[in-house]
Amino acid sequence: MDATQDPTGPLSDEEVEQFVNLLRRYLQHELDQWQGLVAESDYGPIYAFFTNKLPDEWPHEMFRPL
């Protein structure tokens, strides 16, 4: 990342691509059954839940492919 960029601002297209690639690798090689994460934001906590099984009554169509 260029030192003139704000590291707390929006991700660049390159950073989004890197994030998606790293997330794919993490999910492929590190995720066992599930992982729950929480991150603080300016709007309150944000929750992320990764699982290798679609929860009951959650349609596959509600997810965006990476």
Image (cartoon, grey):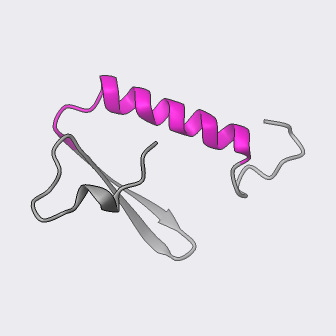
Identity of the residue furthest to the left in this view: 56
Identity of the residue furthest to the front in this view: 61
Counting from the top left corner in percent of width and height, residue 47 is at 36, 62
Q: Quadrant of residue 16?
A: top right
Q: Quadrant of the N terminus?
A: top right
Q: Which residue is more in the foreground, 54 or 49?
A: 54
Q: Indicate yes or no whether the magenta region holds residue 30.
A: yes
Counting from the top left corner in percent of width and height, residue 23 is at 45, 36
Residue 4, relative to residue 8: is it above or below? above
Q: Which residue is more in the foreground, 29 or 9?
A: 29
Q: Indicate yes or no whether the magenta region holds residue 3.
A: no
Q: Specify whether 27 is left or right of 8.
A: left
Q: Quadrant of residue 17?
A: top right
Residue 58, relative to residue 23: is it above or below? below
Residue at image position (31%, 59%) is 61
Residue 22, relative to residue 7: is it above or below? above
Residue at image position (15%, 45%) is 53
Q: Which residue is more in the foreground, 22 or 59?
A: 59
Stretch of the chain drawn in magenta: 12-34
Residue at image position (35%, 56%) is 63
Number of on-image labels: 0
Q: What main secondary structure does the magenta stretch of the protein show?
A: helix
Residue 29, relative to residue 24: is it above or below? above
Identity of the residue furthest to the top in this view: 29
Q: Specify whether 11 is left or right of 32.
A: right
Counting from the top left corner in percent of width and height, residue 25 is at 42, 26
